Every structure is written in structure tokens, then in C-alpha cells.
């Protein structure tokens, strides 16, 4: 039997869900990447929900510009969370973005459930973005030794978060 035939024969055997996705990383490296990316996924989903909640409830003279800015960053958080989840999946790790996981793991207080003045929105977003950027910077430590592609993904997200932090915190002055 040729190697190709053996592969075809073994690939027709049903696999457990845990074996469904092949990875080029060993189990220890997969776990090390999961320990960094899963909390980032939670942070990004939380940021997207928070920014949308503030988007709906912002009041003040700068309502329109901040309302639109919050829409932009929400889209960015959703894109990044999808990229992080798909990176985990591509490494054979099942991502967890369920609301229960996000609510249980988020270190941030929930966004207010009522009207929020524009100045409070700017401060709240600055604080949350800074916390996620700092955590992302810590998650980068040693990641390049384990998985360069995941490191590259986090560097891009960190760059974007720090740009957003600049945009929001400059409004606090």
C-alpha cells in the first residue's frame, strides 16, 4: 500500500472532535498559545459589547462623532476577535466566545445600562482599551518562541489597540 493510499484509508476513519483539526504545533505549544489567545478573545468580545452598549446610550454635545467612532471600534473588535478565534481553531484549539465565558472571565465592570455622558464614555473606553493593550503586551512575552504567526497576530492587534487608546485618551484633555 502506498503512502497516499494509507493516508486515504486512515482519513476515512471517523475522528473525534478533538482530533478533527490537525496542527503543526505539539500539545504543549498549543496549550501555551491557548493560554494567551483565549483571554484575548474574551477581552475583544467584551470590548465589542461594551463599545456597542456605550454607542447606544451616549449623550452630550459630541454625541454624533463619538457614536460613529464607537461603531468603528466595535467593527474592529469583532474583526480581531474573529481572527483570534480562527487562529486558535487553525492550531487545533477550540475557541470559547460564549456569553457565559465572556461574562465570567472579563476583568472589567459591566458598561452602564443607562444614559452615559460623553466624557464618561471617553474615559471608560480609554481605561478598557488601555487594560486590554497592557494585557496583550504581556501575552506577547515569549510567544514568538512558540508560534510566530500568533505573535504576529497579537502585534497587529496591539498596534491597533494603542492607536485607539491614543484616539480616545486625547479627548480626555
Image (tube, rainbow, N blue to C red):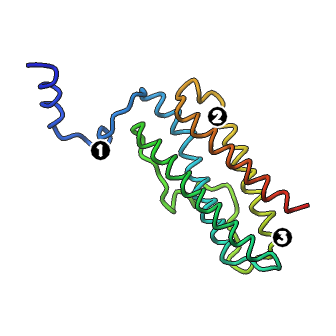
Regarding mark 2 in the picture, which secondary structure is present there? helix
List x then y, in percent, for residue 156: 62, 41
List x then y, in percent, for residue 26: 42, 26
Q: Name the residue under label 1.
A: 17
Q: Name the residue under label 3.
A: 119
Vertical arrangement, residue 23 with respect to residue 76, above or below: above
Q: How far apart are marks 3 and 2 (CA)?
A: 32 Å
How packed mark 3 is, by other alpha carbons closer than 10 Å (few <14, some 14-19, many 20 or more), is some
Choose the circle earlier in sequence order: 1 or 2. 1
Side of 125 relative to 17 (left or right): right
Residue at 64%, 63% (x, y): give it.
Answer: 72
Regarding mark 1 in the picture, which secondary structure is present there? helix
Q: How far apart are marks 3 and 1 (CA)?
A: 48 Å
Side of 40 relative to 27 (left or right): right
Q: Which mark is residue 140?
A: 2
Q: How far apart are marks 1 and 2 (CA)?
A: 29 Å
Regarding mark 3 in the picture, which secondary structure is present there? helix
Vertical arrangement, residue 104 with respect to residue 16, above or below: below
List x then y, in percent, for residue 99: 51, 62
Q: Which mark is residue 61?
A: none
Residue at 47%, 28% (x, y): give it.
Answer: 28
Q: How many marks?
A: 3
Amino acid at each position: 500500500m502506498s503512502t497516499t493510499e494509507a493516508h486515504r484509508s486512515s482519513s476515512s476513519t471517523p475522528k473525534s472532535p478533538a482530533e478533527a483539526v490537525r496542527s503543526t504545533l505539539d500539545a504543549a505549544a498549543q496549550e501555551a498559545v491557548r493560554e494567551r489567545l483565549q483571554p484575548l478573545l474574551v477581552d475583544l468580545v467584551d470590548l465589542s459589547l461594551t463599545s456597542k452598549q456605550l454607542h447606544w446610550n451616549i449623550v452630550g454635545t459630541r454625541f454624533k462623532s463619538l457614536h460613529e467612532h464607537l461603531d468603528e471600534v466595535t467593527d474592529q473588535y469583532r474583526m480581531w476577535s474573529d481572527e483570534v478565534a480562527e487562529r486558535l481553531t487553525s492550531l487545533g484549539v477550540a475557541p470559547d466566545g460564549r456569553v457565559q465565558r465572556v461574562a465570567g472571565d472579563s476583568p472589567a465592570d459591566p458598561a452602564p445600562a443607562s444614559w452615559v455622558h460623553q466624557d464618561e464614555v471617553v474615559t471608560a473606553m480609554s481605561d478598557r482599551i488601555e487594560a486590554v493593550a497592557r494585557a496583550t503586551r504581556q501575552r506577547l512575552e515569549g510567544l514568538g518562541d512558540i508560534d510566530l504567526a500568533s505573535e504576529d497576530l497579537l502585534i497587529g492587534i496591539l498596534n491597533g489597540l494603542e492607536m485607539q487608546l491614543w484616539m480616545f485618551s486625547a479627548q480626555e484633555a
